Image (tube, rainbow, N blue to C red):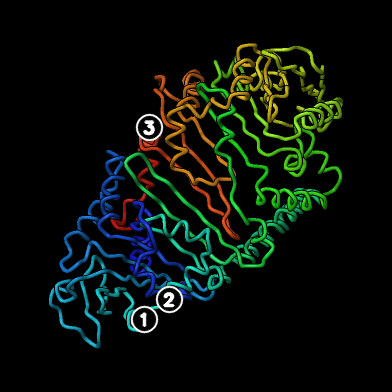
């Protein structure tokens, strides 16, 4: 049992470890039974091996010797067709609680089966091949394919007849096929055949909900069950999942797709993509820690907003009030009705201990109703004034048209939070000073205090009243030639889906430069050297005909910098027993 699990896990790890972009699904997938639980699809063996080499180069001294050895071993196998495609087919036990091991069959491209098996004679149609720690059985399928497994019965019974590609593509839908077609290696999951496992996930979450009800009370249980109902609907509607990784000279792209059954409630939420690309351009340029945009005009986003509104409507009134307690908590439903898109950037801070985490934060709201949006925000702030929750009281001030900068009449606003000292009891021997926490977030003002103004096609909002930041925010909002001019961000954006409904950029360099000095001051690290500019990590999501696709883009240089900061023992994982047990 142990040997079989090691083989399957090793093959899956190899397959997920590296990929290069290609077009179209691999030919070998046409031979995979449609009821297979999990399929690892490899578009071209040679590209896959090259990407393993590139990943190990990126990892440097943290590279995996096991992966390097495995790649060399595959290259050296006689009779292999390195230009062909391969698949790994994994069938799980019918009962998730059975405790038995999954069965794996590998279809490999060969141009000479006899050379591949080194001239060994078949016995009952199978050739035994010695692999480390176990025997592997090979079967000649013809047409340049060989089936391999350490389970002889699984190899004999494997149905490798042609003509199954159409069924796989249909189940994957537009979202899943994006990942399959765009990745040299993809992991495909058949939700229908894995239904017992998905049901087990739901049952486990229900058990957790019962514990939450006992520990946290009725209100906590209601909130958790509302969340659980969304997860349950999604898993019940799920048709297929796909996961992929693309490697190129500049970085890695990790993809995840979920496709839902046609006609289901979940599929209706993900009809079409979005158009966030232009929103980032209306944010001011400069160093940043986070930037994001959301296309609120997207039919998919609107559907999700309606679903969230319906879900929260069933929560107790007190819980709804708590969810809307914070500053600027306009509901997603209201946001999609008033706007076409929103974008914000958290610019780099001069220092967490004095400057404030949000000191350089601005927001741009694309809307056909700028006056209505500004009025809604002012009304929201006025209504929030004086509200209290768990010892925290919010005080707001709003002054319409308080100042004009560069021809834009700006509403001035301020928000402060007052904490009842008695609310700090029971928080431990050294509770966080709320005043210090607010100053770390917003600077000396202890809360957001900024401007709100209308420009052509939208609204600009700042969280501080610094004149220089306000001027840059207004200029970018008017001209649309701001943060998009950042070359690193542009490189990452080019590797994200073109029709994205949401996108996020994480400025790893500026985040580390902000927290590094504080970590050194508190002794978490011995010393800190400022980090030069790095391309950001990019995250994006789009919708496609009843499913969604998410992508995470990690530039090579950024990954290398992150790797240098990970302790060596974390990479080793503490397991020195099995050389091939990845």
The answer to whether any part of residue 18 appears in the image is no
Mark 1 element type? loop
In this rendering, the answer to whether 3 lies above or below 217 is below
User: 552 or 300: which is nearer to us?
Assistant: 300
From the viewer's perspective, tell me whether residue 556 is left or right of residue 384. Answer: left
Q: Which residue is mark 2?
A: 164
Residue 103 locus on image (x, y percent): 40, 73
How far apart are the alpha carbons under marks 2 and 1?
A: 8 Å
Residue 274 vertical placement versus 132 (above, below): above
The residue wearing badge 1 is: 161
Q: In the rendered view of the protein, which quadrant contains the N terminus?
A: bottom left
- Circle 1: is it few (<14), some (14-19), or many (20+) Cα within 10 Å? few
Q: Earlier in the sequence, mark 1 or mark 3?
A: 1
Label 2–label 1 contact, CB within 8 A: yes
Contact flag, marks 1 and 3 (Cβ < 8 Å): no
Please indicate, yes or no, whether residue 432 appears anywhere in the rendered image: yes
**10 up-or-down from 551: above or below:** below
Q: Is 15 on the left or on the right of 454, as rendered?
A: left
Mark closer to the observer (3, 2): 2
Q: Secondary structure at mark 2?
A: loop
Element class at badge 3: helix
Alpha carbon of mark 1 to alpha carbon of mark 3: how far? 47 Å
Which residue was labeled with disc 3? 561
Measured as percent of width and height from the top left, residue 79 is found at 17, 69
Find residue 551 and report its horizontal and vertical position in percent: 49, 47
């Amino acid at each position: 049992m142990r040997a079989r699990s090691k083989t399957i896990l090793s093959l899956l790890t190899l397959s997920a470890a590296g990929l290069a972009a290609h077009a179209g699904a691999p030919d070998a997938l046409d031979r995979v039974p449609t009821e297979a639980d999990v399929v690892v699809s490899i578009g071209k063996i040679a590209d896959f091996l090259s990407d393993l080499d590139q990943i190990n180069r990126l990892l440097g001294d943290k590279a995996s010797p096991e992966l390097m050895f495995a790649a060399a071993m595959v290259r050296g196998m006689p009779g292999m067709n390195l230009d062909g495609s391969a698949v790994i087919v994994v069938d799980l036990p019918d009962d998730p609680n059975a405790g038995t091991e999954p069965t794996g069959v590998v279809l490999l491209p060969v141009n000479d089966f006899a050379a591949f098996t080194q001239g060994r004679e078949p016995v009952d149609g199978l050739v035994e091949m010695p692999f480390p720690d176990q025997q592997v059985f090979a079967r000649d399928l013809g047409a340049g394919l060989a089936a391999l497994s350490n389970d002889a019965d699984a190899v004999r019974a494997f149905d490798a007849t042609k003509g199954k590609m159409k069924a796989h593509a249909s189940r994957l839908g537009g979202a899943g096929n994006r990942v399959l077609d765009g990745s040299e290696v993809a992991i495909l999951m058949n939700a229908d055949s894995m239904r017992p496992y998905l049901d087990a996930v739901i049952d486990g979450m229900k058990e957790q909900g019962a514990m939450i009800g006992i520990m946290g009370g009725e209100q906590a249980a209601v909130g958790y069950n509302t969340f659980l109902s969304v997860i349950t609907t999604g898993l019940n509607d799920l048709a297929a999942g796909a996961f992929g990784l693309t490697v190129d000279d500049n970085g890695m792209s990790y993809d995840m797709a979920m496709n839902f059954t046609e006609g289901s409630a979940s599929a209706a939420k993900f009809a079409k993509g979005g158009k966030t690309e232009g929103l980032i351009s209306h944010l001011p340029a400069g160093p940043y820690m986070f930037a994001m945009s959301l296309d609120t005009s997207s039919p998919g986003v609107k559907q999700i907003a309606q679903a969230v509104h319906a879900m929260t409507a069933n929560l107790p009134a007190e819980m709804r009030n708590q969810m809307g307690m914070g500053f600027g908590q306009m509901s997603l439903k209201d946001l999609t009705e008033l706007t076409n898109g929103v974008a914000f950037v958290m610019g780099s801070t001069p220092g967490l201990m004095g400057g404030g985490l949000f000191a350089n934060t601005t927001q741009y709201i694309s809307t056909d109703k700028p006056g209505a949006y500004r009025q809604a925000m002012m009304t929201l702030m006025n209504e929030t004034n004086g509200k209290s929750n768990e010892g925290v009281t919010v005080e707001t001030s709003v002054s319409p048209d308080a100042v004009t900068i560069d021809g834009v009449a700006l509403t001035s606003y301020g928000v402060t939070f007052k904490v009842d000292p008695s609310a700090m009891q029971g928080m431990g021997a050294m509770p966080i000073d709320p005043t210090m926490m607010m100053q770390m977030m917003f600077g000396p003002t202890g809360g957001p205090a900024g401007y709100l103004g209308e420009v052509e096609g939208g609204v600009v909002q700042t969280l501080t009243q610094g004149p220089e930041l306000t001027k840059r925010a207004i200029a970018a909002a008017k001209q649309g030639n701001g943060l998009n001019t950042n070359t690193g961000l542009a490189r990452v954006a080019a590797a994200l889906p073109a029709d994205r409904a949401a996108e996020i950029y994480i400025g790893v360099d500026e985040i580390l430069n902000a927290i590094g000095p504080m970590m050194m001051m508190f002794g978490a690290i011995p010393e800190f050297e400022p980090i030069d500019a790095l391309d950001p990590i990019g995250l994006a999501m789009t919708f496609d005909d009843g499913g969604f696709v998410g992508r995470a883009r990690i530039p090579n240089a950024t990954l290398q910098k992150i790797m240098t900061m990970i302790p060596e023992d974390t990479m080793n994982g503490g397991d020195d027993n099995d050389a091939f047990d990845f």
